[in-house]
Image (cartoon, coloured by chain):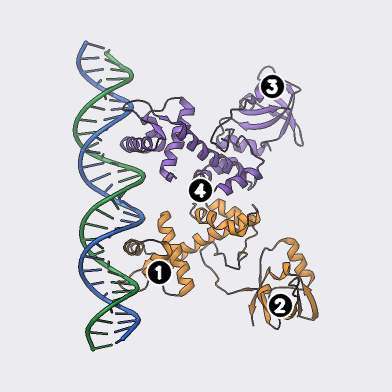
Chain colours: A orange, B purple, C green, D blue
Amino acid sequence: MHSYTEENYLKALFNLANEKGEVSANELSKRLEIKMPTVNSMMKKLAEKKLVHYESYKPLRLTDKGKKEAGLIIRKHRLTEMFLVQVMEFGWEQVHEIAEQMEHLHAPDFFEKMDAMLGYPTIDPHGSPIPDKSGKISWKQYDKLSDCKAGDTVKLSAVINGTDDFFKFLNSRGLQLGVKIKIKSIEVFDKSMHVSYLKKANETLSHTVTERLLVEME
Amino acid sequence: MHSYTEENYLKALFNLANEKGEVSANELSKRLEIKMPTVNSMMKKLAEKKLVHYESYKPLRLTDKGKKEAGLIIRKHRLTEMFLVQVMEFGWEQVHEIAEQMEHLHAPDFFEKMDAMLGYPTIDPHGSPIPDKSGKISWKQYDKLSDCKAGDTVKLSAVINGTDDFFKFLNSRGLQLGVKIKIKSIEVFDKSMHVSYLKKANETLSHTVTERLLVEME
DNA sequence: CTAATAAGTTAGAATAATCTAACAAAATAT
DNA sequence: ATATTTTGTTAGATTATTCTAACTTATTAG
């Protein structure tokens, strides 16, 4: 297995690559707050382990193996955050620090149990995807419906915090994945939305609902 | 703060001291599966930090500071075990490995939340006391079930000598912490007990079992 | 297109935690 | 009470992760 330290390099590489495409040693150094020569030698070490493609003076890239390992760490991080918020009732602002440590636990049963307790979520409440058990991630860009504006037409693509009650509510309104929703207007005082979809010309969705619906812009 | 490694030495010292009084470097070395010279230099280091009293060729002793630090680590370990069993529904035999890692997390809020969710327990699923927030242990006095008499109603509070097999046995009989047990009668010749608990009206527990179950009188 | 700046590399040292080999002290066994 | 065994210590090496200083390559700004 990989050390705590190596795991942090992998995760940082993965995140930087998703934020900006190519990753330079300098960016990685700044992100980790570790000096360049240290980063440099760690890159050579990770290249030995076939986790990183390393060539002098070229940008850094994770190998497929490296991406998988990083994905699995991020999976543990995001499952932990979900668990802390939904099961232990922490606030979202409190969970990052704890997850930052728990992502390094080697405890498959523990994370599987979390996953089950959470109903096998695929995105976290910020809309970030949770990598699957093979470390793969779907990097679709979702917006919360609540962040859209009047006039937008969007496709319902995912649901945050899918409790049974919430799914029953969605079913009763005919809101299924893939439904096209047109935003007619938004109330200022409570942010509720007047929308149309399918054969319904004018339905009202509260902010509580719209911020749990993830959509893709048309 | 202390390193993961230092914490493991403190914990081992604490546990050995509670098992056998004085602790020799040799015992510590065997317990941790770390060679003597390594243990020796770590003891000097911990002595520098005022966590251990170290004198050449004398037994090892934790300082009060060392006892407190060790107690807090063990607190985290036992709260974690409790949480895994009661909230996440793990079996008693599954939780040690996970707790072994989680005891090193630096996350006060996390453990306080656990503590609250568990109702501030003072004893863990293996029957060991949970140190309080200052690292101190209160040695509450439990009775062995085998020392109770017919007619008593008691609450199962802890388990002595909890091997995997024993936990499996208890699980299979539905004997979990907190269960109320009524003693219907006791066989004279082999001291086995006829008891009722939950929906079971007449179960028989051998003396081998009853002397490992710690209970509180109602 | 050079000169200056930024980024990347190499070399060498420091710290933490581990080891083996060799030696010293304490405990034990005859 | 002395020889043997066990336990404890010292010395020196090894690996992982980090650093600073010095040097090289690449990029950018006149």
Tell if the residue under mark 3 belongs to the same chain as the one under mark 2: no
Kind of residue sitting beneath label 3: Cys
Q: Which residue is mark 2?
A: A179
Residue B47 lies, in percent from the top left, at 37, 35
Nearest-to-viewer mark from 4 and 2: 4
Which residue is tagged 3?
A: B148
For the residues carrying marks 2 and 1, which lies nearer the camera in this image? 1
Both labels 3 and 1 in a single chain: no
Task: State whether residue B187 is above or below residue A19.
Answer: above
Task: State whether residue B38 is above or below residue B160.
Answer: below
* A74 sits to left or right of B171: left
Pointer 4 local density, CA inside 10 Å: few below 14, some 14–19, many at least 20: some
Q: Position of residue B185 (x, y in %)?
A: 74, 22
- Tell me the distance, in whole angstroms, between the alpha carbons under discs 3 and 2: 66 Å
Q: Are marks 4 and 1 in contact (CB under 8 Å)?
A: no
User: Is label 4 in contact with label 2 (beta carbons under 8 Å)?
Assistant: no
Q: Chain of mark 2?
A: A
Between marks 3 and 4 in the image, the one whose residue lies nearer the viewer:
4
Q: CA distance from mark 4 to mark 1?
A: 28 Å
Look at label 4 and name its amino acid. Answer: His
Judge if badges 4 and 2 mark residues of a common chain.
no
**Disc 3, disc 4: CB below 8 Å?**
no
Q: Earlier in the sequence, mark 3 or mark 4?
A: 4
Give the Cα distance between marks 2 and 1.
41 Å
Q: For residue A206, what is the image quadrant?
A: bottom right
Tag of residue A27: 1
Depth check, front residue: D20 or B30: D20
Chain to which the residue tagged by mark 4 belongs: B
> Disc 4 designates what residue?
B106
Seen from the viewer's position, the closer of residues A138 and B131 is B131
Label 1 secondary element: helix
Q: Chain of mark 1?
A: A
